[in-house]
Image (cartoon, coloured by chain):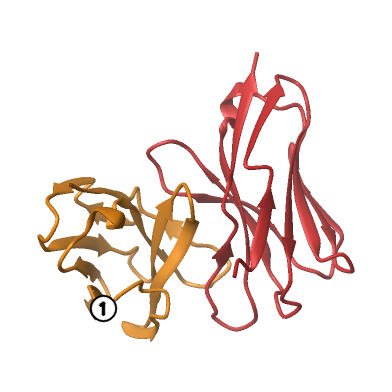
């Protein structure tokens, strides 16, 4: 298994632009999580899905952030419009049970 | 409000020494306490985990000590090696399929 696949690995964009991060979870995993990592705040949960249904999006910082999971093998996290304070590493993780999350390698986002 | 408080923020240990990282929590509903290890450029990966019905769990050189009454748990790395240099995150979750809440992380450097 290739593990959780995230794309792109790096994204550099200008303030105001739309950014779309992509995630392919491990086949057979029924839960998917989006986390954001910064030095100041550590790993923050943004949103998670169970069986493609969003369960809790209370961690999404603003309405500029949105996430979708149209099917069991694909999810997106969109930021529109992006701001410099959105610069961080964004991780996608999937699991069968909460006990073991498998993380992707992350997307390093820089908003100039 | 941070649900899991981790310390120290960074740690330097001599090769062969013992690394100790501590975490404290407030929510008594938490019933699962994992530690994740993250190398640069990678996502976190599950290292070891414990449930509150035991006070200690050991896997190789890694040991979790758990103090339910104090609501604290710690990671001990015995005979620390340069290859252990990474960022370590403690986490906690409640019953059911609730997601993990992570501490802010500890950057460990093991020097020869």
Q: Which quadrant of the figure has residue A25?
A: bottom left
**In the displayed structure, does residue A71 sit left or right of residue B100?**
left
Is residue A2 at all visible to an observer of this figure?
no
Mark 1 chain: A
Residue at 87% in and 60% down? B55
Residue B108 placement (x, y as % from top left): 61, 33
Q: Which residue is mark 1?
A: A63
Residue at 74% in and 60% down? B24
Q: Nearer the viewer, residue B62 or A81?
A: A81
Is residue A84 at all visible to an observer of this figure?
yes
Task: Find chain B in the image and tell me its colour.
Answer: red
Residue at 21% in and 61% down? A22
Q: Nearer the viewer, residue A86 or A48?
A: A86
Q: Residues within 10 Å of mark 1 (few under 14, many from 20)?
A: few
**In the displayed structure, does residue A31 sit left or right of residue B20?**
left
Q: Which quadrant of the figure has residue A93?
A: bottom left
**In the displayed structure, does residue B65 sit left or right of residue A19?**
right
Residue A23 higher or lower than B13, as above or below: below
Screen quadrant of the N terminus of chain A: bottom left
Residue A95 placement (x, y as % from top left): 45, 68
Q: Nearer the viewer, residue B76 or A83?
A: A83
Query: Which chain can be seen in orange?
Result: A
Residue A80 higher or lower than A89, as above or below: below
Q: Nearer the viewer, residue A61 or A98?
A: A61
Q: Secondary structure at mark 1?
A: loop
Of all residues, the one furthest to the top in this rendering is: B112
Residue A102 placement (x, y as % from top left): 44, 58
């Amino acid at each position: 298994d290739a593990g959780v696949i995230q794309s792109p690995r790096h994204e550099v964009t200008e303030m105001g632009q739309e950014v779309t991060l992509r995630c392919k979870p491990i086949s057979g995993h029924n839960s998917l999580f989006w986390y954001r990592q910064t030095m100041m705040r550590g790993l923050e949960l943004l949103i998670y899905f169970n069986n493609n249904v969003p369960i809790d999006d209370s961690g999404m910082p603003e309405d500029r952030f949105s996430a979708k999971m149209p099917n069991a093998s694909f999810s997106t996290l969109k930021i529109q419009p992006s701001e410099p304070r959105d610069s961080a590493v964004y991780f996608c993780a999937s699991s069968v049970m909460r006990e073991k999350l498998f993380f992707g390698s992350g997307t390093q986002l820089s908003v100039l | 409000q941070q649900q899991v408080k981790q310390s120290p923020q960074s740690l330097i240990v001599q090769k062969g020494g013992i690394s100790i990282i501590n975490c404290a929590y407030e929510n008594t509903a938490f019933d699962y306490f994992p530690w994740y290890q993250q190398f640069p450029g990678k996502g976190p990966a599950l290292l070891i985990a414990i449930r509150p019905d035991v006070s200690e769990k050991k896997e190789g050189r890694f040991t979790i000590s758990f103090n339910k009454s104090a609501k604290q748990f710690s990671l001990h790395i015995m005979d620390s090696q340069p290859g252990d240099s990474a960022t370590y995150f403690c986490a906690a979750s409640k019953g059911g399929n609730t997601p993990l809440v992570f501490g802010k992380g500890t950057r460990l450097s093991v020097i020869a």
